[in-house]
Image (cartoon, coloured by chain):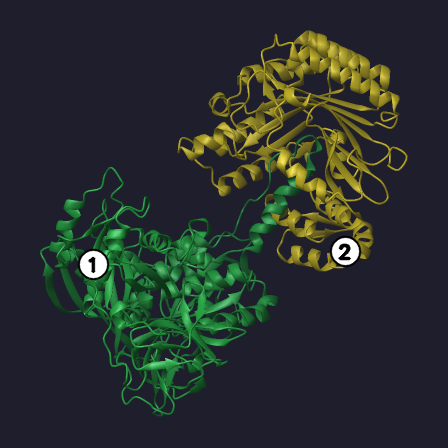
Chain colours: A green, B yellow
């Protein structure tokens, strides 16, 4: 029993962080009776602990709610929740491609903010109908009229009919659903055409294999059908399909316009890619849904267990995480300083942080991360090209013909007042200005070409702080360009520490070396002996500082035989040492390995 | 007594340590099982005023407070009780510390010392020390204490520089300190002073002249402590507010070295990391702490140490706060031994090796780091070992993790 497309609405909710996206979603589930009030767990859709804590969405979600509208008809509303970070831009674009509309939530007190603009742009680029919602109107400081004006001026979205809601009290949620029904177009698509189903998310379940979330663009997908993934060519038989409410409810088929899950039974997550199109093996479509691309990690870092015996556990944990996160790639890596670990590839810095946090929290590992790097293309004198993920693998300078590094097209949206600071920062980061467009009186879009390696050096944080949080950033890989890159080595007590080496543009080597050495001088505590810290390129020392030997370290008076107290202090000292990594005989705190990231302060 | 005295922040840690005490009954080792106490410590937890750096178990109370009497009564009774249970039969050293014992006043001190002399053998060969503050030590008190069996006075001078004394929040002046020493000398041969270094605003020259003044005044023993800013003290709060400059470790080290030079050239020898004495005037009670002699602590927050051939246990206010098996005890003995100039003998190392096979390796490491040296038949701390004691003690303590 398939739903007539005219009774289907597919939409996502987008918002700046903390503007109330999750509470609005919760109220919709509650109002439509999808989840009984007593079963409500705040923010149902963010299922991971980290998602709930950080207020971010990492995985996409889809829930079908049945809504009886004021016109008396029952509509199937598919609410597709999307990840909210630039690292996951591709996933977001695929989720939006599964929708006809978007609900843009704006806080009635904060107004339009950077992510509001970025998300709205993304929705408009995907040709979605955008419904502005002004949330938190229950707050005394709410200013819906000002916010309406901001939406019209800043985003060029008519806001006369903006829905006023309060996720907290539930006011306006009914109006919002009515607006979804009347303003968001019903899905179109030829029900009799060969099947084209867009995969917008994929999860791995150890019992059922790969389970994908799909939007049927054309045709019908029956249960037990033999299917083919158009990009990977992989075939499978549908073991089960259905809709999520949010519990999975199996159905006989999914037809045009519908959103649902498909159990493929495939055991290798790499065979199923987000953005790929599913078609029927015996009646294939000619063209896949456009927009598919291979997701490749952009940022690489070394992850090492602090306790070396945790290496096998780290390997198992990475294996498990990769099942649900095919963008996560890893290879074993050995460091003289840190022992056995992995070089791990991520979509971006947030992805890296989230993965590291999950490894530590869900798997109980203590990890040390080295400074992130990008993939360099090293052309050797004998004509070979090496994809370099780790500074350690850089060949000797004599064998290198030239090095290419990844450049991005970065799009920065910012109020005109902040053009100056953005220019200054981005030029300093080797950015090349391309063009600038006024989207409205209050928003300028700046387009830049810049090296990814510069972007991952706390560029985003700096951009935010230089623009009081207004700038939003979106980027895409552009091309590899030749650059004068060199390897900067850090020597502690005369010995190079491989885990502290990094690749840097030669014009910046001196400055970065100098500031890193100064920084390390503060981070590395005084030891029993003098520790020289040097930054060197190819044996030439660029900067040198010394951590002088500790002269005194003795506890105060031990009173009345209270040796327990003294023991406790020694215990504390021991715990402190445990958190450090011994490199040679130098005790190095973990911060040292990340210091490279923040050299500009 | 517990509720009468602020036991600074010990409670939570105490609990966690009791868990690890496993086989030890919470009241400690039984009298039949353990070795007799060799040292007695009596804690007097009162002061006229708390000093700005102090985090000891003491409290400022008015000299008229009835708490002083209640306390005295309690101590008198606990001495009686200890004597009845035979705990005082082997005591070789007695130490009245605080707080400020002299703040109790002569009448109360007399009750305590009188009770003590009735309860144990308090002859001249038993070392009986008492701490005194320059502002509360009077001539009649000196005479009576001496007559009651006290044979060593330790005066909390801290500095002979009035500005430094003011910084510390001490109530006495340099002149009062000199007077108190002179006063003590009217009866006592064995007079010790405490001096502090590393105090904000204190120059090495100021410290040096304090050391010289102490020597010139004829004391037989000097304790030297670098100031430590402890959590929760007024100094700690002042430092957080930026009102108190931090003293660099380098300057503290310089001053500690200065003390050593001045005292040694005047004929004192360093027998413990913080203690210097003329020959024969080492504080035996102090040494008991570092050489594994069981001690009984009376009064609130006083620590007692008991040991049998299986365990070493420390108790505070009747509760086990520390319980060591033989490996841990052995590591602790090594660590405590290194506080003394005598260090750790080859015989001790030989015995330790059975329980702690890594000991030889650890000693070799410490030697290569220049913290200890092998001297005749023992391992002793070097000058660096004295200054970087925590590294040295930590390495030995960690032998029994």
What is the chain identity of the residue bearing mark 2? B
Of badges 1 and 2, nearer the viewer stands: 1
Along the line of sight, the residue nearer the viewer: B363 or A163: A163
Name the residue carrying label 2.
Answer: B356
Along the line of sight, the residue nearer the viewer: B44 or A417: A417
Along the line of sight, the residue nearer the viewer: B375 or A522: A522
Q: Is residue B201 visible?
A: no
The reply to whether dot 1 and dot 2 touch (C-beta < 8 Å) is no
Percent position of residue A202, x then y: 41, 73
Which label sits on residue A131? 1
Percent position of residue A174, x then y: 27, 52
Q: Secondary structure at mark 1?
A: strand
What is the chain identity of the residue bearing mark 1? A
Q: Quadrant of residue A203?
A: bottom left
The answer to whether B32 is drawn above or below residue A127 in the figure is above
Work out whether disc 1 and disc 2 sit on a shared chain: no
């Amino acid at each position: 029993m398939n739903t007539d497309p005219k009774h289907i609405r597919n939409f996502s909710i987008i918002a700046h962080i903390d503007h109330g996206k999750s509470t609005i979603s919760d109220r919709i589930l509650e109002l439509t009776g999808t989840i009984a009030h007593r079963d409500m767990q705040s923010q149902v859709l963010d299922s991971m602990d980290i998602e709930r804590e950080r207020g971010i969405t990492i995985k996409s979600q889809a829930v079908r709610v049945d809504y009886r509208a004021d016109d008396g008809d029952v509509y199937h509303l598919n609410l597709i929740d999307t990840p909210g970070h630039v690292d996951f831009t591709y996933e977001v674009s695929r989720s939006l491609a599964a929708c006809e509309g978007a609900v843009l939530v704006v806080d009635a007190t904060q107004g339009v903010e950077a992510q509001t603009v970025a998300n709205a742009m993304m929705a408009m680029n995907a040709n979605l109908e955008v419904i502005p919602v002004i949330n938190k109107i229950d707050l005394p400081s709410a200013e819906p009229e000002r916010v309406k004006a901001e939406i019209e001026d800043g985003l060029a979205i008519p806001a006369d009919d903006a829905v006023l809601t309060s996720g907290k009290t539930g006011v306006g949620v009914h109006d919002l659903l009515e607006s979804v029904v009347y303003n968001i177009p019903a899905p179109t698509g030829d029900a009799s055409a060969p099947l084209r189903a867009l995969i917008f998310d994929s999860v791995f379940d150890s019992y059922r294999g790969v389970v994908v979330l799909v939007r049927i663009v054309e045709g019908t997908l029956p249960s037990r059908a033999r299917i083919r993934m158009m990009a990977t060519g992989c075939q499978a038989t549908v073991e089960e399909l259905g809709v999520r409410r949010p519990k999975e409810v199996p159905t006989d088929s999914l037809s045009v316009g519908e959103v649902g899950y498909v159990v493929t039974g495939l055991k290798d997550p790499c065979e199923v890619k987000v953005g790929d199109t599913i078609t029927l093996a015996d009646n294939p479509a000619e063209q896949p849904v456009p927009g598919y691309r291979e997701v490749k990690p952009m940022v690489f870092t070394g992850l090492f267990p602090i306790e070396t015996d945790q290496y096998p556990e780290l390997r198992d944990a990475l294996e498990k995480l990769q099942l649900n996160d095919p963008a996560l790639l890893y290879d074993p890596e050995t460091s003289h300083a840190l022992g056995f670990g992995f070089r791990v590839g991520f979509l971006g810095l947030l992805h890296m942080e989230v993965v590291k946090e999950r490894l530590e929290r869900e798997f109980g590992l203590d990890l040390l991360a080295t400074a992130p790097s990008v993939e360099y293309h090293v052309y050797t004198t004998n004509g070979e090209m090496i994809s370099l993920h780790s500074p350690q693998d850089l060949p000797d300078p004599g064998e290198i013909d030239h090095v290419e590094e990844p450049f991005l097209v970065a799009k920065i949206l910012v109020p005109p007042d902040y053009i100056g600071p953005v220019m200054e920062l981005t030029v300093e980061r080797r950015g090349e200005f391309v063009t600038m467009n006024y989207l409205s009186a209050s928003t300028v879009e700046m387009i830049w070409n810049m090296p990814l390696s510069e972007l991952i050096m706390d560029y985003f944080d700096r951009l935010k702080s230089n623009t009081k949080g207004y700038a939003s950033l979106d980027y895409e890989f552009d091309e590899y360009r030749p650059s004068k890159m060199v390897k900067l080595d850090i020597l502690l007590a005369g010995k190079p520490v491989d885990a502290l080496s990094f690749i840097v543009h030669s014009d910046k080597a001196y400055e970065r070396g100098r500031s890193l050495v100064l920084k390390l001088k503060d981070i590395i505590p005084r030891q029993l002996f003098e520790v020289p810290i040097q930054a060197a390129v190819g044996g030439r020392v660029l900067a040198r500082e010394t951590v002088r030997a500790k002269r005194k370290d003795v506890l105060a008076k031990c009173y009345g035989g209270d040796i327990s107290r003294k023991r406790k202090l020694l215990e504390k000292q021991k715990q402190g040492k445990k958190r450090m990594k011994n490199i040679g005989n130098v005790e190095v705190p973990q911060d040292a390995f990340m210091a490279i990231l923040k050299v500009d302060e | 007594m517990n509720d009468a005295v602020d036991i600074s922040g010990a409670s939570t840690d105490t609990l966690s340590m009791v868990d690890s005490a496993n086989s030890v009954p919470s009241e400690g080792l039984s009298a039949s099982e353990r070795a007799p106490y060799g040292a007695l410590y009596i804690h007097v937890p009162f002061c006229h005023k708390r000093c700005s750096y102090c985090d000891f178990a003491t409290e400022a109370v008015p000299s008229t407070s009835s708490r002083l009497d209640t306390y005295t009564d309690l101590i008198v009774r606990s001495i009686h009780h200890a004597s009845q249970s035979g705990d005082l039969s082997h005591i070789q050293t007695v130490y009245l510390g605080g707080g400020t014992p002299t703040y109790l006043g002569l009448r109360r001190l007399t009750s305590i010392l009188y009770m003590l002399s009735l309860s144990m053998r308090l002859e001249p060969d038993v070392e009986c020390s008492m701490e005194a503050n320059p502002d509360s030590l009077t001539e009649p008190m000196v005479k009576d204490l001496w007559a009651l069996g006290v044979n060593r006075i330790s005066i909390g001078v801290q500095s002979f520089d009035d500005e430094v004394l003011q910084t510390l929040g001490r109530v006495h002046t340099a002149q009062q300190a000199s007077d108190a020493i002179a006063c003590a000398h009217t009866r006592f041969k064995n007079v010790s002073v405490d001096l502090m270094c590393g105090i904000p605003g204190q120059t090495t020259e100021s410290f040096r002249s304090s050391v010289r003044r102490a020597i010139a005044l004829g004391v037989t023993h000097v304790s030297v402590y670098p100031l430590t800013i402890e959590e929760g003290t007024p100094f700690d709060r002042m430092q957080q507010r930026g009102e108190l400059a931090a003293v660099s470790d380098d300057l503290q080290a310089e001053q500690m070295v200065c003390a050593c030079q001045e005292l040694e050239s005047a004929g004192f020898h360093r027998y413990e990391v913080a203690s210097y004495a003329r020959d024969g005037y080492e504080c035996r009670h102090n040494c008991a702490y570092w050489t594994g002699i069981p001690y009984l602590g009376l009064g609130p927050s006083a620590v007692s140490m008991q040991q049998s051939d299986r365990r070493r246990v420390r108790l505070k206010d009747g509760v086990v706060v520390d319980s060591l098996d033989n490996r841990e005890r052995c590591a602790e003995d090594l660590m405590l031994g290194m506080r003394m100039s005598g260090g750790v003998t080859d015989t001790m190392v030989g015995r330790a090796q059975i329980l702690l096979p890594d000991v030889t390796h650890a000693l070799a490491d410490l030697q290569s780091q220049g913290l200890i040296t092998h001297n005749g038949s023992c391992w002793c701390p070097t000058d660096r070992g004295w200054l970087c004691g925590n590294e040295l003690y930590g390495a030995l303590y960690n032998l029994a993790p």
